[in-house]
Image: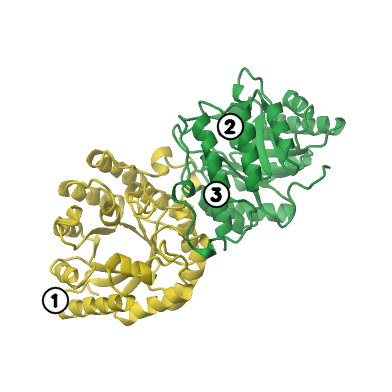
Chain colours: A yellow, B green
Amino acid sequence: MGGVFKPYPTGTIALREVGLRDGLQLTKSYPSTAAKRDWIAQEYAAGLRHFEVGSFLPPSRTPQFADVRDVIDAVNSHPQAHGVALALNERGATDALATEVQEITVVISASAAHNEANVRRSQEQSLHEIANVVRLRDESDRDPIINVGIAMAFGCSISGDVAEDDVMRLVDQCMGAGADMVGLADTVGYAGPRQIERLCKRMASRFGDAPYVMHLHDTRGLGLANASAALDAGCRVFDASLAGLGGCPFAPGATGNIVLEDLIFLAETKGFATGIDLNTVVKARAILQEEMPDEALHGAIAQSGVPRTSGWRA
Amino acid sequence: MGGVFKPYPTGTIALREVGLRDGLQLTKSYPSTAAKRDWIAQEYAAGLRHFEVGSFLPPSRTPQFADVRDVIDAVNSHPQAHGVALALNERGATDALATEVQEITVVISASAAHNEANVRRSQEQSLHEIANVVRLRDESDRDPIINVGIAMAFGCSISGDVAEDDVMRLVDQCMGAGADMVGLADTVGYAGPRQIERLCKRMASRFGDAPYVMHLHDTRGLGLANASAALDAGCRVFDASLAGLGGCPFAPGATGNIVLEDLIFLAETKGFATGIDLNTVVKARAILQEEMPDEALHGAIAQSGVPRTSGWRA
């Protein structure tokens, strides 16, 4: 891990815009490359620094990410921006390593059944893949962070319960395979605040001050309650998307990622200085309105505005 | 306070359906009396016990509450149901005391400016009114609980900040005026979890195990995060409405009361046994769909269903 700045400094909170990747994964339309560039620029001006921008997959399957290289360049045109891209296998990682992306996310599922359904591999095969991606990175002249996103970490829509011990074992196996960091994803919005709190405490005793990602979905309405619990339990890196862009493949019509704007509001009311100007982020929604007029835009702060109280930034 | 059952027993959690009152306060349409009866019956069958059913106001101003006496009777047709109605002045209280309603809510605002704007009285005059309502109750042959709802307890859309010391002073003044219990209302959805936690802790040191109400709105997206914080800080009585029925007079289009179905889900994930069958409550939304087809119905659980995990009722 090199680079001129440290992407997740201790003592700070990082709110990552994943709308350009996870958001666009399930929408029916997507913005032009120029609009993506504008989206990043406006949020960067607002103070955001972390952008998940696409996935290295065959463009025939995911045309919304065909411009991933250009969008990585767009991120890198901003001096302190940190770009993240998904690579689901060694071919994807090879492609990612040919770019200047600063972080590569590989996905494994905490549920064996979902891992099979999602990537047609056993968890063991996925762990091998992670080790191979790390090796490819080490052999390359590039040094992006390798981050493993653990899907279904709070329960699985196929197999139901996912034991917390199994999640923590998988966390250790990912780190053992050479990952630099991991994230826990509530892929289908099953988690409640207690469960979040328990796993965050285990992550804290595993990682201390080192960062890990919390990737929450609002599918069942508890997204921000869970984010609040995770903040209380020491988590400092969160994924979210502008206007809650995205969805849930297992619950048509349901909301997806937690709403970035509302997450910023939550964090500020809790006394975490995000360094982000909320109103500027809200204004960026106009890009989505224009480029994707048929997509549902979520979020309460965009509708209601910030409080008239002086103390809401606690 | 008499009656054959204690409406807020220590050690239990009470989720109160306020859609029939606060919900209908701001909607453009409202259900028939028969549909209100059905709404109460279906939620009672689901396990709900507390229903705020209307307001004693001139029917010319609020036709949606013209049937408040019938709806109180509908609540009382269920052996363990507890009915609540609003009375904004002595005339309303006199009318309420002519019914068998078990709880009368009187409102005062923690913001002097909002109190003037809302009821055209000073806070001192409103405290007098509360004392008069208590006296009317004591002189009557009825013994409903007198509950004071403190509006704008977490900030005011007119005057901005509301000091926590002032809120607690008003709580004491309400109890001094003879109220049996009070509630704190985040009328415009300004609160964050930290603020909720601080005030709940002060309420706990003021009231111990005695109940007080938390009335949260989801106007800025933090409704359930705030409910989660209040549960953690010992609050056990919550207002909510089916499908989040209601709105915000100061933010057109914004959501109002927190969504009852999602609150039940939250409480159960946190290990609080609500005694409520969530799916039965979700089914009751059909009444609103039929009777008020133009109103927006909110809520995530109704859209996505409960998790496939065995452990979501923690």
Q: Which quadrant of the view contains residue B86?
A: top right
How many numbered dots are placed on residues in this image?
A: 3
Q: Is residue B295 above or below residue B201?
A: above
**Mark carried by residue B279:** 3
Mark 3 burial class by Cα count in 10 Å: few <14, some 14-19, many 20+: some
Residue lying at the far top in this picture: please name it: B60
Front: mark 1 or 2: 1
Q: Nearer the viewer, mark 3 or mark 1?
A: 3
The residue type indicated by label 2 comes to His
For mark 2, give the secondary structure.
helix
Return the residue at label 2.
Answer: B114
The residue positioned 45% from the left and 31% from the top of the image is B252
Compute the Cα span from label 1 to label 2.
64 Å
For the residue pair A247 and B215, the one nearer the viewer reads as A247
Q: Which mark is residue A141?
A: 1
Q: Quadrant of residue B184?
A: top right
Q: Nearer the viewer, mark 2 or mark 3?
A: 3
